């Protein structure tokens, strides 16, 4: 299994978008990959949340990493997080 590395850009959003590195890794390992813009890849994985985010209650958090599959590692460019 290739190592997964977050760019400085992606890592900078850990707190403000509310995802964890473990969630990003699980999404990449467990969810199907699909094409994204600029020749990159993406996937989506839903996680139980059952908490508040920005003062609103949500049952589910979806983590969507956008990444590049390099020969020796997977490089995560950014991560989007959705709450519903």
Image (cartoon, helix red, strand yellow):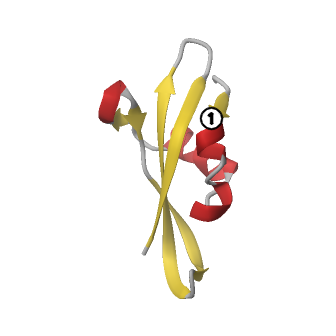
> Is 57 located above or below residue 77 in the figure?
below
- What kind of element bears circle 1? loop
> Is 56 located above or below residue 41 in the figure?
below
Q: Position of residue 13 (x, y in %)?
A: 61, 53
Quarter occupied by the N terminus: top right
Would you say 11 lies left or right of 38 here?
right
Question: Which residue is pictured at 55% across the width and 70% down the height?
Answer: 48
> Is 77 located above or below residue 61 in the figure?
above
Q: Position of residue 36 (x, y in %)?
A: 33, 36
Q: Is residue 64 visible?
A: yes
- Of 30 and 28, nearer the camera is 28
Question: Which residue is pictured at 62% across the width and 35% down the height?
Answer: 7
Question: Which residue is pictured at 48% across the width and 26% down the height?
Answer: 68
Furthest-top residue in view?
71
The image quadrant that residue 41 belongs to is top left
| Residue labelled with disc 1 | 7
Q: Is residue 18 visible?
A: no
Would you say 7 lies left or right of 56 here?
right
Q: Would you call the spot at circle 1 few (<14 residues within 10 Å), some (14-19), or many (20 or more)?
A: few
């Amino acid at each position: 299994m290739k190592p997964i590395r977050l760019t400085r850009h992606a890592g900078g959003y850990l707190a403000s978008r509310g995802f964890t590195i473990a969630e990003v890794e699980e999404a990449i390992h467990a969810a199907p990959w699909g094409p994204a813009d600029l020749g990159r890849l993406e996937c989506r994985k839903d996680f139980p949340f059952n908490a508040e985010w920005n003062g609103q209650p949500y049952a589910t958090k979806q983590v969507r990493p956008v990444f590049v599959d390099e020969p020796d590692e997977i490089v995560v460019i950014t991560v989007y997080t959705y709450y519903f």
